[in-house]
Amino acid sequence: MRPLSDRALLFLPFLLFSCAPKLEEVKAPLNFPTDVHSYAQPNEARVTHSFLDLSVDFNTKTLTGSVTHTLTGTNKIVLDTRDLTIARTETSTDGQTFAPAQHTLGASDPILGAPLTIPLASGDRFVRVHYTTSPKAVALQWLEPSQTAGKRAPYLYTQGQPIYTRSWIPVQDSPSIRITYKARIRTQPNFFAVMSANNDQRTAAPTGDYSFDMTQAVPPYLIALAVGEIQFRLIGGRTGVYTEKAMLDASAREFTDLENMLSAAERLYGTYRWDRYDLLVLPPSFPIGGMENPRLTFATPTILAGDKSLVSLVSHELAHSWSGNLVTNATWSDFWLNEGFTVYVERRIQEEIYGVQQSEMEFAIEVDELKKEMATLKPEDTRLHVDLKGRDPEDGVTLVPYVKGALLLRALEQELGRERWDAFVRSYFDKFAFQSITTATFESYLKEQFPNLKLDFKQWIYSPGLPASTPVIKSLLLEAATEQAARFAAGKPVETRDWLSLQYLSFLRALPPTLTAAQMAALDQQFRFTQSKNSEILAAWLLLSVQHNYTPASAALEDFLSRVGRQKFIKPLYQELAKTPAGKTRAAALFAKYKPNYHPIAAAAVEAILKK
């Protein structure tokens, strides 16, 4: 981490650009794959380094300033944008003297946004874009004080994956184009800013003026920013947690195993290459469980269960430090390379820290959820390599790339043996470190290393459903929970001594769909599910309560929907409510009341449900 005094270096244009990476040092493929979700033409000209200079305005809910890109290539540079107001553009040959440049902002597509094309004169190696974001930028979540844990000050955070970074930075927004970046972020003096880069830990004296330097090349979707009344707590030598004061103690207690997780991952897959691994626990409106932004994982507070029972999410995001961040999918059709590997690595980390039984139970639950979801998907969307041309890349974010991808890797492990497979995975991360690759590249390397492989790789990748070679994931802990659910349904006593939280979750999911009001009341009386502090268990119980019209949980349902914006939880609850006329009326009323608490991504998902 750079000391605070080093910030001054970033404010001097000459020194800034003299510190930009030399063009010949930037590694990149000679031919970039076609990315149907980007207007960029990287084989003609591409960005290698970016400097952000932005001011944060909570009153107008905008970011205003400029981005200066270091380029390689000729003719013109094409950037992705979405809902940005472009003030002017400039070009330069030396990064010191800039001249006005023409630009063309193309027609806007509802998914892709609009291309920004800037002609390049001979020798141009820098382009600067002055711009302002829209208050409705899909990547920016502006929270009112009431939407935060502290209830005192507003908050801003970004979510760039898959193609939302273009709504706050005009950039070549493709995962195949990796860049280094620096940034200067100005905000109110009482606020602290953090990014997916080096971060200052001295949050007690915020200045409102912060500088960042990310020296490892990342795809643009991993550029992340958060601003608010944020504090820091050190956990280990390379690990810590940032969050609001109201959640700091609980977060630090929950993540005491963070350093152990990092060490376990290194034992399995080699040196951690991102210097620090810190967590930012966000306000409850964060729409997903976590986001693997390098050096600073963004995490939902819904994993703060008080007993570490939900920290597998952290193992997942930590695993992305190798799979996804270090080696990245080149297009969103290759998404399984990010997520399938990550679920597999997550399982191995959990096994190292918490034992085989817990890890296998988690995997078995995921496989069960995958099978249920696949039954609702079109066959072509159950393939690992999904055709997303003309579609929103969000359409490919199902459990298929995550869990079917992990099952493929488990199948490879079973055929090759763990020792050979582990050696291959480590070599894979080393060979393709800081690169973005396609499924074809992975297949070629796999077959190069194992020419006599029996597994039908193409069937796994391009055929729908689960192949006959799919590994069977067994869990004694899960079987025990399922057995007790059957006993309850038969009117017999239930034994849950020494259960893990996930066993209670599995118990709830295994209950029959014909529970009576008396049975629901008996469950609540024995296990106090309506008062559960575990968000996974509470969400599952509230779903059962809606299905069975269990009115004693009605207030808890509204409270949950008012304070939680995680799409994994709220989407099924709104879907279940919308299945009856009365429920849909209530769902619409609740959504109208609490929509401001949700991220635009989650709000759009709920709106789609209520419009049906």
Image (cartoon, grey):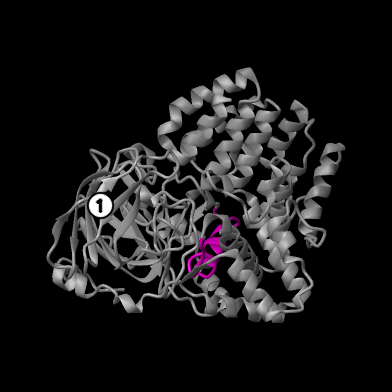
In this picture, which residue range is highlighted in magenta? 306-330
Apparent side of residue 128 relative to residue 475 in the rendered image (left or right): left
Decide whether residue 598 is among the magenta residues. no
Residue that appears at 45% across and 46% down: 286
The residue under the point 74% across, 48% down is 371
Instruction: Please state, as top left, top right, bottom left or bottom right, where the N terminus lies in the image.
Output: bottom left
Count of marks placed on residues:
1
Residue lying at 48% horizontally and 66% vertically, measured from the top left:
325
Which residue is drawn at the image coordinates 47% and 34% (left, top)?
A: 562
179 lies left or right of 344: left
Q: Quadrant of residue 99?
A: bottom left
Q: Position of residue 50 (x, y in %)?
A: 29, 63
Decide which of 136, 157 is in the foreground and name it: 136
Magenta-drawn stretch contains 311 = yes
**Mark 1 secondary-structure assignment:** loop
Q: Residue 432: where, in percent of width, then height?
A: 52, 75
Q: Nearer the viewer, residue 310 or 39?
A: 39
Q: Is residue 56 visible?
A: no
Residue 372 point in image, percent of width and height: 73, 44
Please name the amino acid that badge 1 sits on: Phe
Q: Relative to 605, does residue 328 appear above or below in the rendering? A: below
From the viewer's perspective, is residue 513 above or below residue 27?
Answer: above
Can you identify the residue that label 1 sits on? 191
The residue carrying pointer 1 sits among few (fewer than 14), some (14 to 19) or many (20 or more) residues within 10 Å by Cα, namely many
Q: Position of residue 198 (x, y in %)?
A: 33, 68
Residue 198 visible, this angle: yes
